[in-house]
Amino acid sequence: MKPSINFIILGNLIPPTPESLARENIDAQLAACGWVAQDRARMNLYAGPGIAVREFPLTTGYADYLLFVDRKAIGVIEAKAEGVTLSGVAASVARVARLKQSVLMSAFEGKLS
């Protein structure tokens, strides 16, 4: 696992945000399963068979991770805070899934740039 990133601004140590710590944790779990996690700006769908692209822009907002297998979009990871139950976010996840379905269909058809 890569170390946490801290920033020094004007001599003060700025601790990582909860979001950046969660991203490190998710990236490590994805890597342990054979996925390559990448930023959208440096996206390379040829880097491996399974690519997880962080903060992927969609017409409905951003996917925490958009998953590609063999350069085709296959799914979305929506990260939630530890301790949040699935029943507590089921309605919002279902809504996001419906909204993002058309984006994934476009990706399957090769229309994503």
Image (spheres, rainbow, N blue to C red):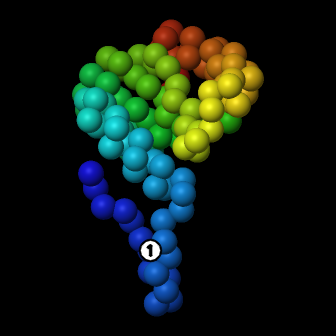
Name the one closer to the observer, 50 or 41.
Answer: 50
- Amino acid identity at mark 1: Phe
Image mark count: 1
Residue visible at 70% across and 31% down? Answer: 88
Find residue 65 and report its horizontal and vertical position in percent. Answer: 49, 34
Q: Vertical placement of 76 versus 102: above or below? A: below
Residue visible at 53% across and 62% down? Answer: 17
Residue 62 visible in image: no
Q: Vertical placement of 82 versus 113: above or below? A: below
Q: Is residue 6 left or right of residue 85?
A: left
Q: Is residue 87 left or right of residue 38?
A: right
Q: Residue furthest bottom?
A: 11
Q: Vertical placement of 81 versus 4: above or below? A: above
Residue visible at 51% across and 30% down? Answer: 77
Name the one closer to the observer, 60 or 88.
Answer: 88
Which residue matches tag 1? 7
Find residue 87 and report its horizontal and vertical position in percent. Answer: 68, 25
Name the one closer to the observer, 93 or 9.
Answer: 93
Residue 30 visible in image: yes
Q: Callout 1: 10 Å neighbours few (<14), some, many (20+)?
A: few
For residue 61, what is the image quadrant? top right
Find residue 37 and report its horizontal and vertical position in percent. Answer: 36, 39
Residue visible at 44% across and 35% down? Answer: 53
Helix, strand, or loop for circle 1?
Answer: strand
Find residue 94 and report its horizontal and vertical position in percent. Answer: 69, 19
Name the one closer to the observer, 72 or 99.
Answer: 99
